[in-house]
Image: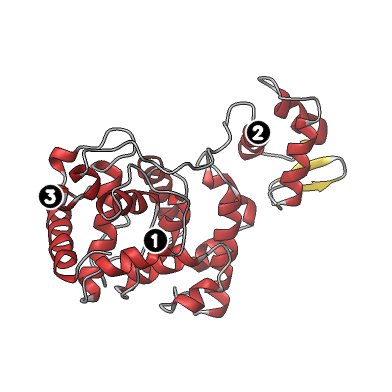
Amino acid sequence: MVHEDAAAEIADAVIGWFEREARELPWRGEVGEIDPWAVLVSEFMLQQTQASRVIPQFEAWMARWPKPSDLAAEAPGEAVRAWGRLGYPRRALWLHRAAVQLATEHGDQVPRNVDTLLALTGIGPYTARAIASFAFALREPVVDTNTRRVIARLVHGLAAAGAPSPRDLDDMAALLPLDPVRTRLFNAAAMELGAVVCTARSPLCSACPVADWCQWRGSGFPANAPSVRRQAAFQGSDRQVRGRIMALLRSATAPIAEHEALAAAAEGGVHDEAQPRRAYDSLISDGLLVEFEGHVRLP
């Protein structure tokens, strides 16, 4: 655990760096200036997706649906269509359902309370804390993949983070400034540091504002990364085959025959003969496709 005095110095250094070097991202802004709905949308889109890919989708989304009620008034399939190639299209359905809840149960406003946020579809503990911090400057620790890597190196002297654990939040909480506004800055700054400086493969230690405190650097950069299970390859996966079906449906102006959807799934090759049907059935099960009279469409 970092000593209290060192934690304050680390926070000051990271925040100072962030105020000088932060990327301009459309969902960032001062509390009171940034729309909490924009923060919520960005957090849905940023899950497992790089910021550079999210920016154009986010800007188009907010221009089309500037309030939750605007999205709620549309069919869920329009959210899936607008999601484009961000991946994991169930997030689009969840975001639509959350918009309906905000429009009908919360006066078209994003709630401030973490427990209330957790009751919204598609929002888990990380997203709830991120919205509470970034939209309302509540003093909540926010830990994403980039932050976990910074903490692993800075605090624990490890080359990479291990599997997520409750200790991640404790480690982050120990570094947070007492002032909620500075906590908000530090949460964003730690993420930014991991995204652009303390990167997974080629960390730029010479540009790091906390290099002097880094336990991994001080130990000589040992190759001591914890073993973690690798994500299955996308090429040839059911995810890839599902994506082919979704791409066809997003571009379609009318319902597609079931056999056309299965043919699209098989284009480019499949891992096994059962894969197109398995991918198709899983999309039906997830609510991303609706079947009727031998045809299929977005919900």
> Measured from the top left, where is residue 178 in percent x and y?
22, 76
The structure residue drawn at horizontal position 26% and vertical position 42%, both measured from the top left corner, is 196
Quote the CA–CA distance across marks 2 and 3: 52 Å
Quote the CA–CA distance across marks 3 and 1: 22 Å
- Depth check: 250 or 169 in front? 169
Of the numbered discs in the image, which one, if any, rests on residue 168? 1
Q: Quadrant of residue 3?
A: bottom left
Quote the CA–CA distance across marks 1 and 2: 40 Å
Mark 3 nearby-residue class (10 Å; few <14, some 14–19, many ≥20): few
Q: Are marks 3 and 1 in contact (CB under 8 Å)?
A: no
Give the number of the mark in front: 1 or 2.
1
In the picture, measured across the screen, residue 98 lies left or right of residue 139, that is right
In the picture, measured across the screen, residue 272 lies left or right of residue 161, that is right
Asked if residue 214 shows in the view, the reply is yes
Determine whether the residue tagged by mark 3 lies in a helix, strand or loop.
helix
Q: Are marks 1 and 2 in contact (CB under 8 Å)?
A: no
Q: Amino acid at mark 3?
A: Asp
Q: Amino acid at mark 2?
A: Leu
Residue farthest to the top, as pictured: 268
Q: Number of labelled discs? A: 3
Position of residue 245 relative to residue 193, above or below, is above
